[in-house]
C-alpha cells in the first residue's frame, strides 16, 4: 500500500516572532527540500530541533495528515499547503486511525517505524494565535505522530510512504487509540493495561502510561 505525501520538509532553528510573552526559538517553520537528503537514526540531515522534547531516535521524523488541516480552517484564514505544525511529512490520505505502533514504511531508501504520539506544545499555539489549540488538538486525537528510523538511507523529494510491515496483531494499537487513552481516558485501567502490552512503545511513553495505571488502580 502506497500513501502519497503532499510534502517532505525540513527546518533550521531560528528566532521566531510569534510570541510576545517569551523568547521563541524553533525549527517550526519548515520548507521543502529538493533532490535527495540523508535520513539518519536521528532525523533528516538538514532538520534541526531546539530541545530534547523534540527529536532524538524515537522522534526522528514527524508526520501530520493533510486530512486534519480541515480542523483548523475556521481559525486560520490561509491554511498552509504543508508543514502546518512543523511536520516533516505531510501525508494526503493517512491519519491516526490508520497508523499503528510498529507499522513500518519504506521512505525512499530508508525504513521508518511508528514510535510515538505527538504532544502539542505552546509554540504552535502561539504561531496561530488559537487560545485552545493544544486542548483541541489533543482531545481530537489528531495530533500526528513520530517515527523511529529502522534503516537509514537517502530520501528523495519524490518519495512516498509504502507500508511494508503491519504492527503486531495481538497488541495492535493505533495512534488515535493511544491518543484517546492518554488525553481523554487515562483513568481506564483496562485500556491502559492493554496499551502497555504494545512492544513498540518508547520507554518514556511506557513510564507515563504506567504512572496513569498505578494512579487509576488506587
Image: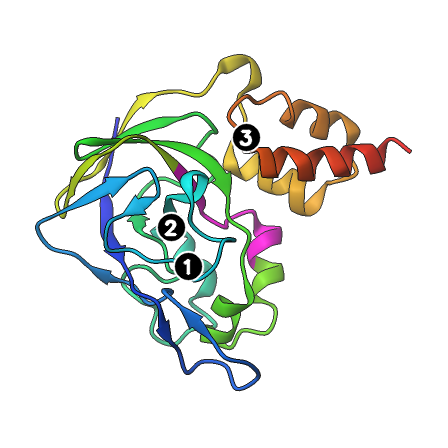
Q: Is residue 126 above or below residue 139?
A: below
Residue at image location 52% in from the left, 53% down from the top: 53
What is the CA distance from the residue labelled 2 to the residue labelled 1? 6 Å
Please report the bounds of the magenta region as a residue range: 137-147
Q: Looking at the image, which residue sits at the far bottom?
A: 20
Q: Is residue 62 located in the magenta-colored stretch of the structure?
A: no
Secondary structure beneath dot 3 equals: loop
Task: Tell me the tag on residue 216.
Answer: none
For residue 201, which numbered disc appears in the image?
A: 3
Residue 141 in the image, given as x and y percentages of width and height? 56, 47
Is residue 141 magenta-colored?
yes
Q: Dot 3 surroundings within 10 Å: few (below 14), some, or many (20 or more)?
A: many
Residue drawn at 51 percent across, 37 percent down: 175
Relative to 137, 79 lies left or right: left
Q: Are marks 2 and 1 in contact (CB under 8 Å)?
A: yes
In the rendered view, does 118 fall on the left or right side of 158? Answer: right
Q: Name the residue located 46 percent from the left edge and 65 percent from the top edge.
A: 72
Label 1 secondary element: helix
Residue 67: which disc? 2
Mark before the other along the chain sequence, 2 or 3: 2
Q: Sort mark 1 into few (<14), some (14-19) or many (20+) by Cα contacts within 10 Å.
A: few
Amino acid at each position: 500500500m502506497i500513501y502519497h505525501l503532499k510534502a517532505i520538509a525540513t527546518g533550521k532553528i531560528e528566532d521566531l516572532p510569534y510570541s510576545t510573552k517569551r523568547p521563541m526559538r524553533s525549527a517550526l517553520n519548515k520548507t521543502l527540500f529538493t533532490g535527495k537528503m540523508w535520513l539518519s537514526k536521528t532525523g533528516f540531515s538538514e532538520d534541526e530541533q531546539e530541545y530534547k522534547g523534540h527529536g532524538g531516535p524515537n522522534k526522528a521524523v514527524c508526520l501530520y495528515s493533510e486530512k486534519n488541516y480541515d480542523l483548523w480552517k475556521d481559525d486560520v484564514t490561509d491554511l498552509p499547503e504543508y508543514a502546518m505544525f512543523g511536520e516533516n511529512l505531510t501525508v494526503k490520505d493517512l491519519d491516526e486511525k490508520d497508523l499503528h505502533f510498529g507499522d513500518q514504511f519504506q521512505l525512499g531508501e530508508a525504513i521508518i517505524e511508528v514510535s510515538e504520539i505527538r504532544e502539542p506544545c505552546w509554540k504552535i499555539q502561539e504561531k496561530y494565535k488559537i487560545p485552545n489549540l493544544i486542548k483541541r488538538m489533543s482531545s481530537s486525537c489528531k495530533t500526528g505522530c513520530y517515527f523511529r528510523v529502522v534503516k537509514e538511507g537517502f530520501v528523495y523529494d519524490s518519495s512516498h510512504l509504502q507500508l511494508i510491515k503491519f504492527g503486531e496483531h495481538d497488541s495492535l494499537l493505533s495512534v488515535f487509540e493511544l491518543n484517546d487513552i492518554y488525553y481523554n481516558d487515562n483513568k481506564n485501567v483496562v485500556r491502559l493495561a492493554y496499551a502497555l502490552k504494545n512492544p513498540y512503545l518508547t520507554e518514556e511513553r511506557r513510564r507515563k502510561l504506567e504512572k496513569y495505571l498505578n494512579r487509576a488502580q488506587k
